[in-house]
Amino acid sequence: MQMINDKWKFYFQTFGRDKYKLLFSTIINIIQPIILLPIVLLVRYIIDDIIPQKDTNMVILAGFTVLVLYITSNVITLLSQKIILKTVKTAILNLREQIVNKLYMFPRSFYDNTDIAQLHTVVVQDTNRLDFASNIVISSLIPSLIISGALGCILLFLNLKLFLIMMLIVPVMIFFSKLSGDRIKTWTKKSHRLFETITKGILRILQIMDLTVQRSAERVEKDRQLQNLTAFRDVSYKHAWIISVYQLLQSTIIAFSGVLIIVVGGIAVINELISLGNLISFYVATGMLKAQMSTVTRAIPIAIEGYESLTTIYNLYQTEYDIIYNGSKRIEFTGYINLKAVDFSYGKNKLLININLNLSPGSITAICGPNGSGKSTIVNLILGNYKPHCGLIYADDNSYEDIDISYLHKNIGVVPQNPIIFPASIWENITYGYPETDKRTVKEAVSAANIKYFIEQLPMGYDTMIGENGVLLSGGECQSIAIAQALLLKPKLLILDEPTNNLDDEKIGSLIKNIKNLSYHPAVLLISHNKLVQQEASQIFIIKDHTLVKM
């Protein structure tokens, strides 16, 4: 119960002060039944009084009044829905913003152990479902429940006996709602989870398309995805079928009540127990109630689906994680990095033991070692993505425990082993995060990265689009763009993780020369097996038996 309350608190806090707008819209919805009552009374008046008097003018006037009241009711509904839609959309925007902020707060270890495709589905699909459900619940379900309650009071006022007869169906409706609601909830969960599986499957197809074609594995991959698609078809069919049965049952019960009222009311009119106008006005009000209950019936499955999505989003938001560093000291970093007696493990498996490493401005440090020995882990430790299990890391003699790591990143340029290139222009890739960078600074970085001539030979130059993951460029060109990106802000520390994988010896030599001649003399950390690169290093280390050994 506490979790449910916390879940709703989490949801409503996204509305902020706009909660008062929802309250205002609720008040507007309460006004609607006040307008509906005169409509019902006018119908009775027309049948019982005006028509017997054969007063044509009064019939027209009364009919016009009913029309005006209906239009007024619809205008109020429209006004209420406009307020609600704008309020809900703003709340969902706030929710999505909170989730994005949360994603940036999670440590690297969270993403190492998380299914990214599933996470993507939660952030995109579940927030979209919650958005849709919120609109339906607040703009349709809640107003319909309020109006239904008011119409019930009107029906009670019109005729007590007919009202009591109609109320006989309420327990039946509640029984079927409870029975169907539980089943809808179960199949909604299954449908959502299988949809996540399909999303992951399609993403997998796109990510490994080249490998699949190269190995003629299309049939294997198609069969794998067909299993998921078939499972989703079966579950979504059952989900939709249960909803259809539920809605049909409720509609049938409501229709039965209407027939019952006509029969019982008709007998009462024949026996002169009530007037024809009373019966017709009661039936008109029942028709209004039927319309509102139909809205409720359609909205409940959507509300259940939205609640399941809210649960998923809430669980993500409540995910606990270890804060790597939370220091706030902002230092003017000059390039000195010191690892002192650092140990690091993945679970129970020790990867690095007693690592001691000093990086200083103007020096080039190379680290080599077999795959999986911990080279990239050292990079992540320096970047503050991981925290040592033992030992300390310093930047300019300031412990990582004390400093603002995010601010430190502004002075560190990184070229990962697999550069991240996104579908945009060369200029946008190089200036990512800093679009206001001037041309002179960009060209300096491009020259140092040894790619200036290549860019200037392109018809569109810096505006050339390079496709998803740089598919329109060679591996070496992508690597050079990543190097230019890393050099853009004149970093005090430059980290190059296997930067020469796609470069020939001539380009490697030119790149190292350019880095050594940089006017701002950064500290350079090279992760490389290339002998030519290692020859240019001030100090070379190899990872052996989980520790750094100087060569």
Image: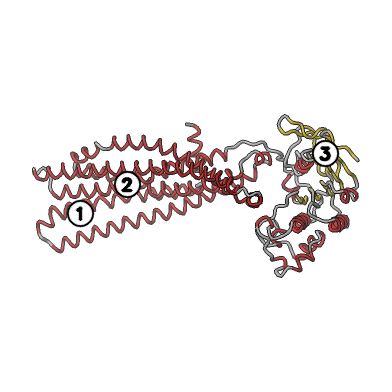
Nearest to the observer: residue 189 or residue 19: 189
**First-in-chain label (1 vs 2):** 1
- Which residue is depicted at the point 55% across and 38% down? 315
> For the C terminus, which image quadrant?
top right
Q: What percent of the width, then of the height, locates residue 472?
A: 69, 60
Q: Which mark is residue 42?
A: 1
Residue 512, image quadrant: bottom right
Q: CA distance from mark 1 to mark 2?
A: 25 Å
| Callouts 2 and 3 close, C-beta under 8 Å | no
SS of the residue at dot 2?
helix
- Residue 195 - label: none
Q: Looking at the picture, which amino acid does disc 1 mark?
A: Leu
Q: Name the kind of residue labelled 2 in the image.
A: Ser
Please indicate whether residue 521 sits to the left or right of residue 223 in the image: right
Image location (x, y in percent) of residue 296: 35, 45
The label number, if any, that marks residue 294 in the structure image: 2
Select label 1 or label 2 by which is in front. Answer: 2
